[in-house]
Amino acid sequence: MKYAVLGDLHANLEALEAVLHDAEKQGATHYACTGDLVGYNADPRACLKVLRTLGCKTVQGNHDFYACDSSSMELFTPTARKSIEWTRKQLTAPQRKYLNTLPLIKDLENFTIVHSSLQNPEQWNYIFKADTAESSFRNQFSNVCFFGHTHVPLAFITDGTSMEKGFYKTIRVRPGFKYLVNVSSVGQPRDRDPRTGYVLYDLEAQTITMRRIEYDIETTQRKIRDAGLPFRNALRLSYGR
């Protein structure tokens, strides 16, 4: 059993198609997503259709929540706020209902998926540092938890007494350790690598592998401009920021 674990798609259809093509070649048998299916890019309806057809197990991200809710977005940047306002107008009623009913945390096989932190996931806290990772670990009952939100593929590993943190290519899951792993971003990487990214989790071999794939960035950028979305959404894709 191999899980392709995706995160932060942000309505980037070209990146999603590239990831799914690679995942199929790598022998993925199941799919999971750490949330933020929509926002920033121009294909929210198409991306939702693809994931639902795939039977992808998904949790809710903050962009998903606000895309189907009228709550204040004062904590968002003007660019993110405008992107969500645009997205709200694109989604169908059934799609808004689907996003609104997604759980914040989901257990799958022997691992967990969440968008932000396992501690107060509805607060959408970012995990960059050891202290926020430690708070999440205290609420983690599975050996492995995949998360998103930061768009930066960092892994935190603890044996209960000490913690390691860093970027990764392949992680071998060992008994007695817990792993908190960011799966990068399909639709808007922010680690200065513009390639789309996802994780392949081989449950038999107990390996977590980061995959980075080239995709048609120019087409995604053109769609953003044509839709009237903020120009910065298109520009940042070239630089992975």
Image (cartoon, helix red, strand yellow):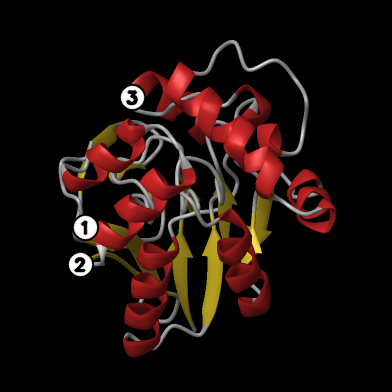
The front one of 146 and 72 is: 72
Circles 1 and 2 in contact, beta carbons < 8 Å: yes
Residue at the image point whose x is 52% and y is 34% from the top: 83
Q: Is residue 145 left or right of residue 207?
A: right
- The secondary element bearing badge 1 is classed as loop
Alpha carbon separation for disc pair 3 and 1 = 26 Å
Give the residue pinned by disc 3: 130
Residue at the image point whose x is 35% and y is 31% from the top: 161
Give the residue pinned by disc 1: 195
Q: Residues within 10 Å of mark 2 (few under 14, many from 20)?
A: few
- The secondary element bearing badge 3 is classed as helix
Mark 1 and mark 2 lie on one chain; the one further toward the N terminus is 1
So how many labels did they put on this image?
A: 3
Alpha carbon separation for disc pair 1 and 2 = 5 Å
Q: Label 1 amino acid?
A: Arg
Mark 2 and mark 3 lie on one chain; the one further toward the N terminus is 3
Residue at the image point whose x is 24% and y is 58% from the top: 218
Above or below for 63 versus 46: above
Residue at the image point whose x is 18% and y is 46% from the top: 238
Q: Residues within 10 Å of mark 1 (few under 14, many from 20)?
A: many
Q: Position of residue 15 (x, y in %)?
A: 36, 63
Q: Label 3 amino acid?
A: Ala
Q: Position of residue 4 (x, y in %)?
A: 44, 71
Give the residue pinned by disc 2: 214
Above or below for 8 versus 68: below
The front one of 111 and 183 is: 183
Q: Position of residue 134 (x, y in %)?
A: 44, 27
Mark 3 and mark 1 lie on one chain; the one further toward the N terminus is 3
Question: The C terminus is located in which quarter?
Answer: top left
